[in-house]
């Protein structure tokens, strides 16, 4: 793409993003003596998942199977379990490439690469009795990079038992046309593979926590190339690209009969990757 093409595309990105539903505002910030520690930040994010599921009203069903993708240490699952209205309700399936012990012996741990899974049924078979057939499924994913999140959406978007899906997005620059879960959405916007690749690249311009734009080489380079009026405009371009990418993901879940929205589940000061894709099935059809 020529520089003129890139400048035209940047204007088109801003236009598209202005017509999309923005993420809902984060919860009100609480007073703090300073920036939270890394452990406190992780705890706040995990607790936010539980708060969202409480708000959706999906924790009351004791038949639920909670599938935690990219579970890591299992902090998100631990917070969800603590928020259950009745102790011992539901089953927890923690999926990660690393074979780490779960935070609770009652939780099932599966060592698997999400990118190579052919269907959600593969996980169900591996979980055996911990995942009863027909049980409502609640999927959570905390910061699955790029294509791994798209694969997760593809795995569960068509699951009739899916009650809710909540995933915080990150690493949009690692998404790709071949693995993106809603290419039809991009094409309907009048964009194609080359333009989508540029959106992914520009997404890395979005604001970062504790890094002003004048200290970010990629933002300065983009401002020169695009003849942008300011470095802030380049950061806004990155945010607009992220909104387009995440909206396509949200709408892919919505096509499966779920109600969806984007929300900032924690303040920006906790993490710059604070946009959560939230999808839930109306209670009347669960």
Image (cartoon, helix red, strand yellow):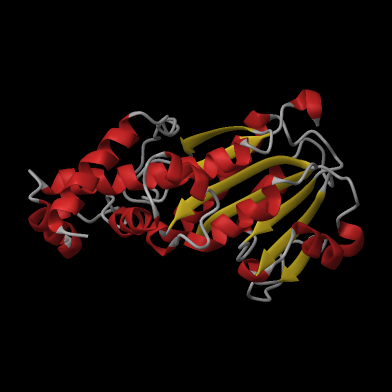
- How many discs appear? 0
Most foreground residue, 82 or 3: 3
Q: Residue at x 68, y 53 (%)?
A: 78
Residue 93's quadrant in the figure? bottom right
Q: Is residue 270 visible?
A: yes
Q: Residue at x 83, y 46 (%)?
A: 90
Residue 264's quadrant in the figure? top left
**How far across and how far down the image is residue 193, in percent?**
39, 57
Most foreground residue, 102 or 94: 94
Q: Is residue 225 left or right of residue 17?
A: left
Q: Which part of the image, by quadrant, shows the N terminus? A: bottom left
Relative to 284, say whether 148 is above or below: below
Q: Is residue 102 left or right of residue 151?
A: right
Q: Residue at x 16, y 59 (%)?
A: 2
Looking at this view, name the residue that lies furthest to the bottom.
99
Q: Is residue 69 left or right of residue 219?
A: right
Q: Is residue 103 visible?
A: no
Q: Which part of the image, by quadrant, shows the C terminus? A: top right
**How far across and how far down the image is residue 69, in percent?**
64, 59
Most foreground residue, 120 or 83: 120
Looking at this view, name the residue that lies furthest to the top.
284
Most foreground residue, 246 or 196: 196
Q: Residue at x 37, y 42 (%)?
A: 190
**How far across and how far down the image is residue 62, in percent?**
85, 40
**How far across and how far down the image is residue 43, in percent?**
53, 52
């Amino acid at each position: 793409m020529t520089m003129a093409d890139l400048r035209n595309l940047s204007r088109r990105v801003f236009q598209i993003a202005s017509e999309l539903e923005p993420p809902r505002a984060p919860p009100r910030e609480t007073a703090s003596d300073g920036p939270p520690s890394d452990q406190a930040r992780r705890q706040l994010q995990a607790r936010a998942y539980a708060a969202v599921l409480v708000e959706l009203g999906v924790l009351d069903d004791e038949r639920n199977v909670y599938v935690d993708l990219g579970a890591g240490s299992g902090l998100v699952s631990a917070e969800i379990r603590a928020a259950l209205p009745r102790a011992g309700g539901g089953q927890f399936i923690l999926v990660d490439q690393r074979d780490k012990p779960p935070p609770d012996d009652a939780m099932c741990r599966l060592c698997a690469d999400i990118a190579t899974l052919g269907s959600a049924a593969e996980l169900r078979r591996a979980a055996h009795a911990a995942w009863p057939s027909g049980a409502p499924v609640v999927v959570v994913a905390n910061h699955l990079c790029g294509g791994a999140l798209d694969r997760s959406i593809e795995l569960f978007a068509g699951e009739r038992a899916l009650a809710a899906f909540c995933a915080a997005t990150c690493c949009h620059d690692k998404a790709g046309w071949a693995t993106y879960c809603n290419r039809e959405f991009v094409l309907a916007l009048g964009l194609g593979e080359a333009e989508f690749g540029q959106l992914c690249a520009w997404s890395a311009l979005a604001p970062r926590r504790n890094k002003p734009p004048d200290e970010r080489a990629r933002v300065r380079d983009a401002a020169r190339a695009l003849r942008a009026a300011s470095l802030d405009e380049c950061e806004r371009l990155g945010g607009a690209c992220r909104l387009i990418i995440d909206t396509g993901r949200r709408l892919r879940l919505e096509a499966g009969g779920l109600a969806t929205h984007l929300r900032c589940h924690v303040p920006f000061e906790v993490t710059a990757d604070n946009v959560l894709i939230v999808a839930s099935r109306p209670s009347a059809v669960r």
